[in-house]
Image (cartoon, rainbow, N blue to C red):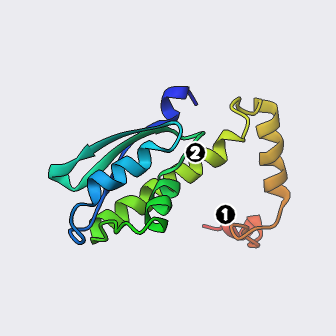
Amino acid sequence: MTSGDLRKKREILFSKFPPGQVPEAADDLKHLEEVEVQPKFEKRSVGVAYELSQHTLRELDEHLIDKGYHLDNTLLTKLTRALIYYVEDTQLHNMGAPEKRLKRSSQEAYVKAWEHHPHGDHDDTPPEWREYK
């Protein structure tokens, strides 16, 4: 994973009511370290840029909610937000995993172990019955 993959640019959308949240929220977010903020008044949103190793969208959203701001809760926004949370959580989880792949011989060992392990795909039918014509 390159450092470019960890640089995130997101938009935080606000609900229509109460009006005037964007400038206040942008000012609030500017006080956080390692967060670039760009208010977008016409879209009722705040653009944010951050390194995933420093912040997540979930953290920024929760910070704003704790401060009393009302985020947009339309279905599309909620689905988009949930997807971004999942992707960022997965990336953070994977950052702790080794980047290099397993050697081929190690993969073969797992395959052999799986073949000997009883699991749902096992067929108890005797070979002579499977080949019956």
Q: Check the image and name the residue furthest to the left.
A: 42
**SS class, disc 2:** helix
- Measure how far apart labels 2 and 1 are at the Cα level: 47 Å
Q: Nearer the viewer, mark 2 or mark 1?
A: 2
Residue 91 marker? 2
Question: Would you name the residue on which mark 1 appears?
Answer: 131
Among the 4 quarters of the image, the one containing residue 122: bottom right
Q: Mark 1 belongs to which amino acid?
A: Glu
Marked residue nearer the N-terminal end (2 or 1): 2
Q: Nearer the viewer, residue 86 or 113?
A: 86
* Residue 40 falls left or right of residue 6: left
**SS class, disc 1:** loop
Q: Nearer the viewer, residue 66 or 115?
A: 66
Residue 56 marker? none
Q: Work out whether 49 lies above or below 128.
A: above
Residue at 75% across / 33% down in the picture?
Answer: 102
Residue at 72% across / 40% down in the picture?
Answer: 97
